[in-house]
Image (spheres, rainbow, N blue to C red):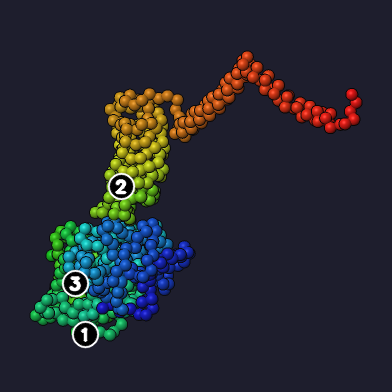
Amino acid sequence: MRQRSPAVLRLLLPLWLLAVSVSPAFLGALASDPSKEPFTIRISCGSFDDVRTAPTNTCGRFANATRPSFIIPPLKTLRYFPLSDGPENCYYINNVPNGHYQVRVFFALVANPNLDSEPIFDVSVEGTLFSSLLLGWSSDDEKTFAEALVFVQDSSLSICFHSTGHGDPSVLSIEVLQIDDNAYNFGLPWGKGTVLRTAKRLTCGSGKPAFDEDLKGVSWGGDRFWLGLKTLSSSSEDQSISTENVIAEALLAPNFYPQSIYQSAIVGTDRQPSLSFEMDVTPNKNYSVWLHFAEIDNGVTAEEQRVFDVLINGDTAFKDVDIVRMTGERFTALVLNKTIAVSGTTLKIILQPVKGTRAIINAIEVFEIIPAENKTLPQEVSALRTLKSSLGLPLRFGWNGDPCVPQQHPWSGVDCQFDNTKGNWVIDGLGLDNQGLRGVIPSDISKLQHLENINLSGNSIKGNIPTSLGTISALQVLDLSYNELNGSIPESLGQLTSLQILNLNGNHLSGKVPASLGGRPLHRARFNFTDNAGLCGIPGLRECGPHLSVAAKIGMAFGVLLAFLFLVVFAACWWKRRQNILRAQKLAAAREAPYAKSRTQFTRDVQMAKHQRPHESSRSSNNESSPHSPK
């Protein structure tokens, strides 16, 4: 089991400590001075803080873990990635100094009986696939982690988990450890164009697995895991030896091997003087083999006392190996490296004595040499991420990591082509038809300058057709049919001289079809503008009148309605006034009639008589009451 000091345990950080800022001057000092501490990040992926990293905005789902290997105290939580959240899920670690790194990922099982007990998935680093977890991995401690040596060139590191449809990928922890820029230089084609996958790392003669920290290694060598091996033979026809003597020439750049791996060894016996080691490998791959020796046998004190050949898959890789002669003295490290092309499924190493005593081996390292994938052009990756956000791409699409690499796991709906002139992958096709998209087409789609085919039909995309589409000169097929696009057809589409198929039918487009598009069908192109009630100007569509915008049409209808209401009100007022006039005229006419006049005169006489009678009564009364009135 893996042992760590308390100081290192504190480096099992939650994800929110990923962003580290380091000055260029300090980075230069790191690269040139091994006494400085290298850049190191250790991530506990099952941290309780559900932190999300840009630009993928994914960190998986929290779950309890079971069977964690090599870490003490064990990490009890992990992250897993359901297929419903997308087939690719990535961690992006930013502000990583450019350089050479050892990247290691630990796996464990989700402690949930409702989930697949052992998921099968792939792992990539910087777009290069370096590990495929196969059935049975959870039962083999050595397979519960994957390790790769990779160069970081753009100050960020991506680690992605790719679903194969067999369970949900689950990750326990991630370690990113800077190592010497020249570490494990095996000659051509070693360099920034290669990734080394650790296939096997054994310390012979020791029965305990251990990490460099426990072996007092220098940090610039990474924190390598050495699987302890007591014997190379299943029948125990060899033996282990050890020493406490200091080993010279260990801990040297660029690999900084800990001297402890040379203080134990496996040697042959009189019955079986040769040693043999065999391991399974991927066929038709190249492997870099590193063999470690130190003469620690007290029975060997001078040259010529132990001489052996090293055969790899039947071919002599190293002839007449004499450790004392080659190092100059006993207790001194010797490292031999050989690149092997393997056609079968087995890598077999035989150490065969040719003079003196039995063969000896102290440690073995085997790396698969993987050509690093060329990435997709950064501006096109950025454009696709904008498209993902703008169209509201469903979570099941994923679209995390690099669109085109690893080549075994390209993004769904994206067609890639390698551009030899640029040395990068480019996007030449988008097939997102009938996917329930509901957003708008961003103008940044024009950054995908290598597109030849765009199919976004059968969705619910709204808004206008971007004018910038007319700048994608290689475009041959543009299918935006059966969406909810509105506005007019951009004149810029007429600049697409390679366009052969243009389907804009089944939308809400309006206005006149550009003349540059209307005549194109004469040149064997197929254009479809039907089922757009507002389009006009070409055969099959209505004739164009004065072009009015929707707002103008609404304004005109509103004006007509106001005019009609005004006329109604005016007519009502005129009719009312007319009725009043007619009534007055009838009244006047009635007053002019003879009967009306006599009746009127009689009424006036009666009224005058009523006014006069009181005066006459008064006078009569006065006359009768006076006894002395004159006669």
Residue marked by disc 3: 139
What amino acid type should be assigned to the residue bearing mark 1?
A: Asn
Q: Residue at x 35, y 40 (%)?
A: 484
Label 1, residues with CA under 10 Å away: few <14, some 14-19, many ≥20: few
Upstream in sequence: badge 1 or badge 2: 1
**In what quadrant of the picture does the C terminus appear?**
top right
Q: Residue at x 45, y 25 (%)?
A: 546
Q: N-terminal of the two: label 3 or label 2?
A: 3
Q: Identify which residue is drawn at 37% across, 66% down.
A: 50
Q: Which quadrant, please, contains the N terminus?
A: bottom left
> SS for tag 1?
loop
Task: Tell me if label 1 and label 2 are in contact, CB under 8 Å.
Answer: no
- Dot 3 falls on a residue whose secondary structure is helix
Residue 195, position in %: x, y?
29, 60
Q: Position of residue 623 (x, y in %)?
A: 84, 29
Q: Amino acid at mark 3?
A: Ser
Q: Is residue 66 left or right of residue 484?
A: left
Nearest to viewer (mark 1 / mark 2): 2
Residue on which disc 2 sits: 436
In which quadrant of the rendered view does residue 523 lie? Answer: top left
On the image, the x and y values in percent for residue 568 come to: 51, 28
Q: Is residue 118 above or below residue 417?
A: below
Q: Residue at x 41, y 30 (%)?
A: 511
In this rendered view, identify the residue nearer to me: 345 or 127: 127
Number of labels in the image equals 3
Q: Which residue is mark 1?
A: 298
The reply, left or right, for residue 585 in relation to residue 70 is right
Image coordinates for residue 107, horizontal then vertical, percent: 26, 68
**Which residue type does callout 2 highlight?**
Gly
